[in-house]
């Protein structure tokens, strides 16, 4: 009884070449597309491209709107934020409180 014989390099290259020939023959025997079918495929492809472009533009518009909303929110938060007093202003306010306490006594 003979054991399994592993295919050699020559066998593998021959099998690959036969597979290529078979695939090429299948492509050659395939019927060419009619003009109407080609036009239909082209129209579908163009419609798909247009839909994808519209989707990309919608995403860009949405991102831009989000950026504008975020910027407006930041501006509103900055406007509502109490003003930071300078050292001189804080000293003047402290002195005014001190003077008011002294005046009450």
Image (tube, rainbow, N blue to C red):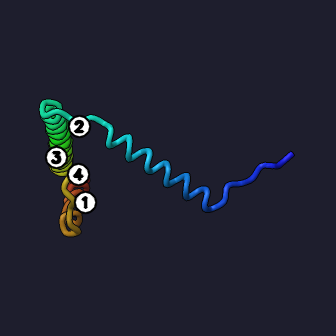
Residue 33 seen from this side: yes
How many circles with numbers are drawn on the protein? 4
| Picture disc at residue 31 | none
Q: CA distance from mark 1 to mark 4?
A: 10 Å
Q: Which sits in the foreground, 79 or 101?
A: 79
CB contact under 8 Å: marks 3 and 1: no
| Picture disc at residue 104 | 4
**Residue 61: percent from the left, percent from the top?**
15, 42
CB contact under 8 Å: marks 1 and 4: no
**Residue 63: percent from the left, percent from the top?**
20, 45
Q: CA distance from mark 3 to mark 1?
A: 52 Å
Q: Disc 4 or disc 3, which is closer to the eye?
A: 3
Q: Disc 2 or disc 1, which is closer to the eye?
A: 2
Pointer 3 or 1: first along the chain? 3
Q: CA distance from mark 2 to mark 3?
A: 47 Å
**Residue 15: percent from the left, percent from the top?**
55, 52
Which quadrant is the N terminus positioned in? Answer: top right
**Residue 20: percent from the left, percent from the top?**
45, 50
Q: Disc 4 or disc 2, which is closer to the eye?
A: 2
Q: Which sits in the foreground, 103 or 49?
A: 49
Q: Residue at x 16, y 42 (%)?
A: 53
| Picture disc at residue 64 | 3
Pointer 1 or 4: first along the chain? 1
Density class for disc 3 (Cα within 10 Å; few <14, some 14-19, many ≥20) is few
Residue farthest to the right?
1
Which residue is disc 1 drawn over?
A: 98
Task: Answer above or below: position of 86 versus 1.
Answer: below
């Amino acid at each position: 009884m003979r054991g399994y014989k592993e295919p050699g390099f020559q066998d593998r290259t021959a099998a690959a070449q036969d597979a290529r020939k078979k695939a090429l023959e299948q492509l050659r025997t395939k019927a060419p597309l009619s003009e109407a079918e080609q036009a239909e495929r082209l129209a579908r492809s163009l419609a798909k491209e247009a839909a994808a472009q519209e989707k990309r533009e919608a995403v860009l518009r949405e991102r831009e709107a989000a950026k504008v909303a975020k910027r407006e929110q930041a501006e509103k938060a900055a406007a509502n934020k109490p003003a930071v007093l300078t050292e001189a202003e804080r000293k003047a306010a402290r002195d005014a409180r001190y003077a008011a306490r002294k005046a009450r006594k």
